[in-house]
Image (tube, rainbow, N blue to C red):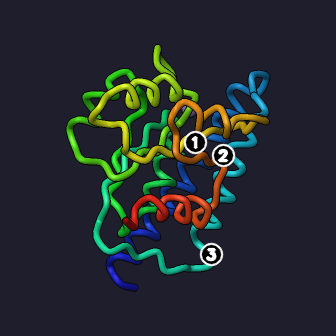
Amino acid sequence: MEEAQLSTACILCLLIFKNFIQRRGRLTINAPKIKTPDLFYKKTFDFLLLDYIFGKTKNYAMPDIKKILYIEDNLDSQELVKLYFRGLAELECYDRAEQILDIVAEKKYDLILMDINLPGKIDGVDAVKILRRDERFKKIPIIAVTAYAMLGDRERFIEVGCDDYISKPFFKSALLDKARRFLQS
Ligand code: MN
């Protein structure tokens, strides 16, 4: 096995192991407090890892390495999306949006993935509004990301200034197809 393949395999094993431990911990220690969405999410995370490992490989090569910012408080999501973009783009993750203007001003990002439900005072929708009000960041493509899709979500996110929307859990192909539309130009 080549070095790159080996390290990807290691990361995947660690993620699956971590995920397993977390789930077991939650089930045995906090059994009465289990929330269905969490459990649902953990299961889909395993499923998505399998999608990553065995999914059809499509050539997503991009002309140059682009910079992507992912605002996301769920660490599993962060790690999975990092894997999705491995070797294709440079992904930087932050789990809060309070400093959104400083974060975006620091580097020249080609695309922003914005989780909508965030801890703290500023959620994803607020963050998008703040960015769009700033002359410097009016044109950076933003894809909104949510865990629980509701009717009318897409329209709501487009209205505040997002360019597109994807609902979690998503396959690698779904995310990369969307991202590529904004990264190719
Ligand atoms: Mn979230």
Q: Which residue is mark 1?
A: 145
| Disc 2: CA contacts within 10 A as few (<14), some (14-19) or many (>=20) | some
Q: Which residue is mark 3?
A: 54
Q: Earlier in the sequence, mark 3 or mark 2?
A: 3
**Toward the viewer: 183 or 55?**
183
For badge 1, the amino acid type reads Val
Rendering coords of residue 7 (x, y %) = 37, 69
Measure how far apart labels 3 and 2 are at the Cα level.
21 Å
- In contact (CB < 8 Å): disc 1 and disc 2: yes
Q: Nearer the viewer, mark 1 or mark 3?
A: 1
The image quadrant of residue 22 is top right
Rendering coords of residue 14 (x, y %) = 48, 57
Q: Is residue 48 left or right of residue 88?
A: right
- Whether residue 140 is visible here, answered yes or no, is yes
Considering the image in quadrants, where does the C terminus appear? bottom left
Q: Which residue is mark 2?
A: 167
For badge 2, the amino acid type reads Ser
| Disc 3: CA contacts within 10 A as few (<14), some (14-19) or many (>=20) | few
Measure how far apart labels 1 and 3 are at the Cα level.
24 Å
Q: Residue at x 38, y 36 (%)?
A: 94
- The local secondary structure at tag 2 comes to strand
Rendering coords of residue 151 (x, y %) = 79, 36
**Toward the viewer: 162 or 117?**
162
Q: Is residue 33 left or right of residue 170?
A: right
For badge 3, the amino acid type reads Phe
- The local secondary structure at tag 1 comes to strand
Whether 177 is drawn above or below 26: the answer is: below
Whether 185 is drawn above or below 121: the answer is: below
Q: Nearer the viewer, mark 3 or mark 2?
A: 2
The image quadrant of residue 131 is top left
